Image: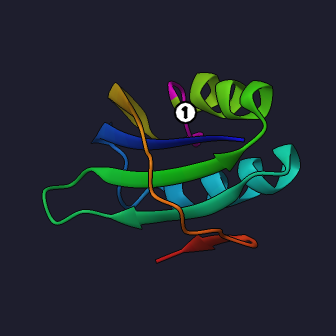
Amino acid sequence: MKRVLLTISGKVQGVCFRRYSQLKANELGLTGYAKNLEDGRVLILLQGGGLAVDRFIAWSEQGSPQSVVDNVLVEEDEADEIYLDFSVY
């Protein structure tokens, strides 16, 4: 299982980015969560198969139809919590 944290910047709040993230994660069989950060970025934790995580990362570089993604920072995450679904906060 691969587990990463994505910090996505650009026009990613107020454009349904988190909801589209949830749909994409569900499509790929990934679990974790997406939440808005106070500075306008979106934080996403993903866990699942390596290929599916890589596909999500590639998708996140474009994002939702109305978003404008400037940067996607990808960090490996070593935490041991297990998520059973993908939540939006």
Look at the magenta stretch and give its main secondary structure: loop
Residue 82 spot, x, y in % from top left: 64, 68
The local secondary structure at tag 1 comes to: helix
Kindly identify the residue that appears in the image at 45 percent across and 57 percent down: 79
Hey, what amino acid is under mark 1?
A: Ser
Furthest toward the bottom, the residue is: 89
Give the side of residue 30 with respect to residue 71, left or right: right
Kindly identify the residue that appears in the image at 61 percent across and 73 percent down: 87
Kindly identify the residue that appears in the image at 50 percent across and 54 percent down: 45
Res. 56 image quadrant: top right
Residue 74 spot, x, y in % from top left: 40, 30
Q: Is 63 a magenta residue?
A: yes
- Answer yes or no: is residue 16 visible: no
Q: Residues within 10 Å of mark 1 (few under 14, many from 20)?
A: many
Front residue of this view, candidates 79 and 64: 79
- Answer yes or no: is residue 42 visible: yes
**Range shown magenta:** 61-66
Q: Is 60 a magenta residue?
A: no
Please give the residue where the numbered disc 1 appears in the rendered image: 60
Does residue 43 lie above or below 73 as drawn?
A: below
Q: How is the image coloured?
A: rainbow
Res. 23 image quadrant: bottom right
Does residue 39 lie above or below 66 as drawn?
A: below
Furthest toward the left, the residue is: 39
Give the side of residue 84 with respect to residue 5, left or right: right
Number of dots carrying numbers: 1
Residue 85 spot, x, y in % from top left: 74, 71
Kindly identify the residue that appears in the image at 75 percent across and 73 percent down: 84
Give the side of residue 12 with respect to residue 89, left or right: left
Give the side of residue 2 with respect to residue 41, left or right: right
